[in-house]
Amino acid sequence: MEISDARWLAKAQDKKYYIDIIFGSKTDQTSIDLHVRENSKGFYKSLFEEASKVADVLALCGDLTDHGTVEEAKVLVEEMLSISIPVVGVLGNHDFENGQEKEIAEVLGKAKMILLGDEPWEYKDVSFAGVKGFGGGF
């Protein structure tokens, strides 16, 4: 998987800083959801490594897991071990699917992922804010 693949990478420029946002997809459809499954081991690692080389921040935007299990969150954490830049994200409706969202947030937090919710997060004069939406809206 190449970092230049348009399905996976979108760039936005703010002042002199580049913020690269990874878009994941479990099908050929473009999606902003990762939907990590227990069998996703090894799928995102090289992409995350490459993103660390070209991005200031990695933003993961909702549906980080496919079925909202702690096991899926642990797979994501394993994939994120190679990331050398800050990771910011928000949980999506799939992360709430099994009622394990607090445990998922704890696992991701221990991996130093900044989960957005009540408070925004700022990096190099760029503010990040995020809320969970359901079924195409809030």
Image: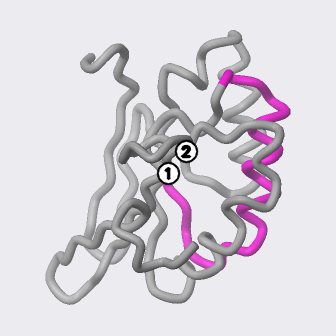
Figure colour scheme: one colour
Q: Position of residue 17 (x, y in %)?
A: 27, 84
The CA distance from mark 2 to mark 1 is: 4 Å
The residue that appears at 17% across and 76% down in the rendered structure is: 14
Q: Residues within 10 Å of mark 1 (few under 14, many from 20)?
A: many
Mark carried by residue 10: none
- Residue position marked by numbered label 2 in the rendering: 34
- Residue position marked by numbered label 1 in the rendering: 24
Answer with the quarter of the image where residue 47 lies.
bottom right
Depicted 72 relative to depicted 95: above or below: below
> Is 37 left or right of 128, judged from the image as shown?
right
Q: Which image quadrant: the C terminus?
A: top left
Mark 2–mark 1 CB contact (< 8 Å): yes
Depicted 43 relative to depicted 89: above or below: below
Q: Residues within 10 Å of mark 2 (few under 14, many from 20)?
A: many
Front-most of residues 111 and 135: 135
> Is 100 left or right of 63, judged from the image as shown?
right
The residue that appears at 78% across and 67% down in the rendered structure is: 81
The residue that appears at 25% across and 19% down in the rendered structure is: 137
Q: Which image quadrant: the N terminus?
A: bottom right
Amino acid type, label 1: Gly
Depicted 17 relative to depicted 113: above or below: below
What span is colored magenta in the figure?
67-88
Amino acid type, label 2: Leu
